[in-house]
Image: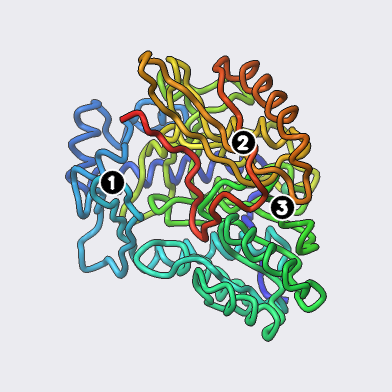
Amino acid sequence: MNRSFMPAFKTQEELAAIQLAGLQWTVRHAFEGSPFYRQRLTEAGVTPDQIQSLDDLKRLPFVTAQDLRENYPWPLLSVPMTRIVRLHASTGTTGKRKVLVYTAKDIDDWAEMFARCYETAELSREDRVQICVGYGVWTAGVGFQLGCERFGALAIPAGPGNIDLQIQFLIDFQTTVLCCTASMALLLAEEIDRRGIRDRIHVKKVIFGAERSSDAMRLKVKTLTGVDHIFDIPGLTEVYGPGTGLDCTCHTGIHYWADYYILEILNPDTLQPVADGEVGEMVYTTLRKEGAPLIRYRSRDLTRAIPGQCPCGSPLPRHDRIVGRSDDMFIVRGVNIYPSHVDEILSREKGVGSEFQIHLDHYEDGKDYMVLKVEREEGGRPEADAALAAKIERALRKETLVSGKVEIVDYQSLPRTERKAKRVFDHRT
Ligand code: ZN
């Protein structure tokens, strides 16, 4: 048996001591190594000596994605450039990409964190891990690969796309673990079902990355492939990449690596901690990152903390799945709506398939209109569409306080993509 990647601490007091030491180190390291941080901390009137307790975190100024863009390309660089061994960049759909730099130790730490993910999912060195996410300047493929090799399982770097090749690999190499986006898993599962080859596929676990999976998608993938476990891997380039935590096989929430970073969950408007169990923005402070440390980095990702201890006994704290991004929020008739909330409403309705789209439009009367296109479930009866649409419209109005029109469309009539599914189509501008 190889070594464990789990943390050494057993109690919350031990964790707090690790976090305080890491916080003190990080603030001093950033202050001394980065002109950006030195200026920010000085403006906030904070010197490294003043960090005496975890409570002093509150005194530190925030860093935003905007800061990363404005100081492109090496915004948070805190070591001499000669110590940097790699860079990664975000896919960057708006404005300039976010570029993050890594020292050799940062890469090593990331491998340890990611290997811990595989250990949390209870993989063994016998497992064969087909990695069907993008390889390139972004962190996805290389992160899954690095962690898999560090853990000691067999990595199959299949990359994204090419369903025929993926299925051939699944059969020929007897893949046991699949790492991909939820959309890709759904495509593969439907294709395996269509070809009637389920008995030749040996996948036991699926690890979803890069995209929030809906309950309906998870159920569909599970039903079609017969896998035992589906995990959601969170992560962001700013905090190394994917692999910042994972749910264990109890699936009670995502255990996160609190010995590598401090996670605050804050109200995005007031920047104060949310009440227990409330949804808020994930704000990260890294504890060991050298190349580009983060101090109170606002990720825009939304989740809630899960209190108490997991039945697995792990002392690692938990957060819920990412429920959306504060950026994804759209406004209809003055009401804030998250696509994830619509998804949640749909996942409670029987007769609904796994895909949906939200279309926003502006009519001549100047009012906003929301049309929700929802797929009928596989084998569902079109005669039941009207009743189903009316039921969803009622639920939508009750929960979001906005009226919308629901159109039920044929199963598989909405596009499937291998990348993140686009949910919101705003035709108003
Ligand atoms: Zn657990």
Lower position in the chain sequence, tag 2 or tag 3: 3
Q: Is residue 207 visible?
A: yes
Point 70% across, 50% down: residue:
218
Between 352 and 281, the residue placed more toward the observer is 352
For disc 2, the marked residue is 343
- Residue depth check, mark 1 versus mark 3: number of the one nearer the observer: 3
Q: How crowded is mark 3: few (under 14 residues within 10 Å), some or many (20 or more)?
A: many
Classify residue 262 as left or right of residue 82. right
Lower position in the chain sequence, tag 1 or tag 2: 1
CA separation in Å, label 1 and label 2 = 40 Å
Mark 2, ligand 1, within 8 Å: the answer is no
Q: Callout 2, which amino acid?
A: Asp
Lower position in the chain sequence, tag 1 or tag 3: 1
For disc 1, the marked residue is 30
Q: Is residue 77 above or below residue 133?
A: above
What is the x, y in percent for residue 323?
Answer: 57, 36
Q: In this view, does 405 lie above or below 47?
A: above
The colour mode here is rainbow
Residue that sits furthest to the front in the current view:
383
The answer to which image quadrant residue 39 occupies is top left
Q: Can residue 317 be seen in this view?
A: no
For disc 3, the marked residue is 248
What is the x, y in percent for residue 216?
Answer: 70, 45
